[in-house]
Amino acid sequence: MRDLFVEAIELVSDETAFAVVLAASGCTLNCLSVREWNELQNTALENAGRAKIWLGIKRVAEALDACHGAGLVHGTIGRSAIVVENGPTTFRLSGCEAAVAIGDPDLGSAARALGHTEVLSFRRDWADLGRLASDLFGIACDSQSSAETRYMMLDAEKQLLQSMLAPPVHRHVDGRAIIADIAAVAQELERIGASTDSILLAYPDRHVIRSEIPSVTSGAISPDDTNKLLQYVTDDLAKSTTRVARTAPRHCDVQLISDHACYDLKRANDRIARIVGCRLRSSDDRVQDAQTLVPQVRVVLNRKEAEAECRRAGHGAGSWVNLSGEECESNRSKQRPAMTVWYALVLSEAFSLLSQRFRTYPITVHETGEASRLLITPRVEPTVDAARAELGLQPAAAELAREMAFEDGSIEWTLSEFDGLGSGPSGVPTLDFDETTKLNGVQAYRFSSDRPINGFTPRYLRPKPDKGLLQAVSRRLASVVAAREQNDLLRALDDPRRVRADSLIAEIASPGSPPATLDASKHAAWYAITRGAALNLVIGPPGVGKSFFVAELIASILDATPDARILVSSQNHEALALMERSLKKRLTAARCQSALNVDPLSACKSDPLCVELARCCVVSK
């Protein structure tokens, strides 16, 4: 640990000043000559060089985390605080002799002594480290344009810099997580540095830039705005979802497939490729066997500019020769660490969609003599109940009885002939639940129908989809695609313990001990939440008591902190109503009226105790 810091040897003083004698054999970054500073930044032109810089930043991060662990705010992270020793990227942290203990009562005078740091906080230290890292890579804090003229960074690098520049405001900044992310980026750069370089250069044919690329943008960019068209293609290919087809069409050497378009390229030479075709991606463009494009692609106007960029990049310009084929096959198993979590998220979304099948109940429809009234009784299908039992669910008849017991008229029901996810034929009736009754000693449910049943034999009762299957699938797929770039979310889903809530929030709204009525799994979930993680997922099939568990948790917070204001949100009104009923049962009658405000449209602004139920997902369905 001591090799991360510049060691202070002694303190000397005279009548007018004092000084700290440091044991350092190198010099600080602000003392480097212009030539030395340029050499340091030129190191970033290659992946291996950037890996070394990131490892140097990791040393500073480890030293800073040690300071914070001791309750010290450094306050002056910058060029003057970093000493370079034994090579251009071996950094030590200095300036700790001016650090301020977080519990120091005289922080005002300490802040004046620290110089540029406006606010004394651990968060500001990490933001200053992010600015220093951007400075080392030649990136302005408000833009990355200066870096794009020299080399292209990996998406993981950009996201890491962004997270360092803007640490979370209302929760604890986990230094260990930042250090782990820096190490992962450095490892990835070292891995790809041996097999490929930072940037691949390409330029489009004239007909491609004049007609095909504008066509791909659907006319959003004018054919005359060449710079925007080139930037569009560069950005499209820079996404982490871009793939290299294992077999390219005959008229080209390499085919790149992005989320939006397909690009056909022919090699002009080893380091420059020509875009000979560009079109919108179609359903026939399968990427199942395609490989992830690891290097970044830079698209310029013509071959002359490509050759100039190639000379400027030097070793940073990659080769197109082995982009597909054997080299891609060797990279098949080299997935980004976050991808495992993303695929798990895909499975979770798929399960959430497919679980709607378990809200399709076998029934029998009985005529009542009234055109707009139906009487429905549950029907036993052994195959359906066997499938439900395999997943730990109640039989369909028992689950339907549970749903009807809590039905308050907020759900629109419909009938179908099949139990698939599709909405069935057009013109199916919409049913409203009226009451529970008996028919020949069997539990029955009376519904009102908006139209007679024509054209099909109703065999299943199910909630009516809001906007149909296509919209539901599209919405879920869009969520999955968007989540792929959210590294912070994926990291939190992978290990929620790494994302801790702010300790002050935990003190303000801390629940008490769990009720004895909860089972062992709910006790474990209760204690996990009270430990202070910022993200907690309570997962379970319908009917296991998720809504009851959350209601107990909220009531416990209100018991301990009567003036707490808690926002509870749900993706639909059914869960919203169930939560309201659970809270009303749990809270005393005197407190119910003032504590609950069920309003999906606006926030409660008057009640001192407020639970607002809005449109988001909290309780897993």
Image (cartoon, helix red, strand yellow):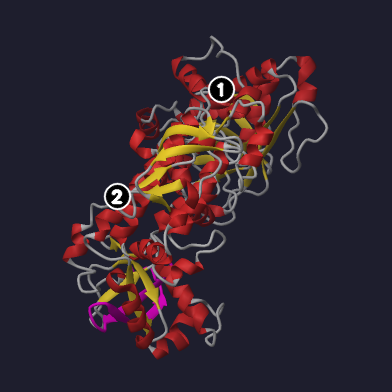
Q: How many marks?
A: 2
Rendered view: 159 above or below 528: below
Q: Which of 87 and 591 is in front in this view?
A: 87
- Give how far across and how far down residue 48 sits, in percent: 28, 58
- Give how far across and how far down residue 584 sits, in percent: 70, 21
Residue 268's image quarter? bottom left
Is 513 covered by the magenta stretch? no
Residue 171's image quarter? top right
Kind of residue sitting beneath label 2: Asn
Q: Which of 491 and 145 is in front in this view?
A: 145
* Mark closer to the observer (1, 2): 2
What kind of secondary structure does the magenta stretch mostly adopt? strand
Give the residue at x 41% y 55%.
Answer: 157
Circle 2: element type: loop
- Give how far across and how far down residue 530 sits, in percent: 54, 22
Circle 1: element type: helix
Estimate the spatial distance between the alpha carbons at disc 1 and disc 2, rounded to whole Å. 58 Å
Q: Mark 1 points at which residue?
A: 549
Q: Crowding at label 2, few (<14), some or many (≥20) Cα neighbours within 10 Å?
A: few
The first of marks 1 and 2 along the sequence is 2
Judged from this view, the residue extending furthest toward the bottom is 206
Q: Nearer the viewer, residue 69 or 364?
A: 69
Using the rendered image of the protein, determine whether residue 386 is visible from the camera's viewpoint.
yes
Q: Is residue 512 left or right of residue 240?
A: right
Q: In this view, does 203 lie to the left or right of 486?
A: left
Label placed on residue 86: 2
Using the rendered image of the protein, determine whether residue 435 is visible from the camera's viewpoint.
no
Judged from this view, the residue extending furthest toward the left is 326
Q: Do the residues labelled 1 and 2 touch (CB within 8 Å)?
A: no
Rendered view: 262 above or below 368: below
Rendered view: 271 above or below 346: below
Q: Which segment is the magenta one?
A: 260-285
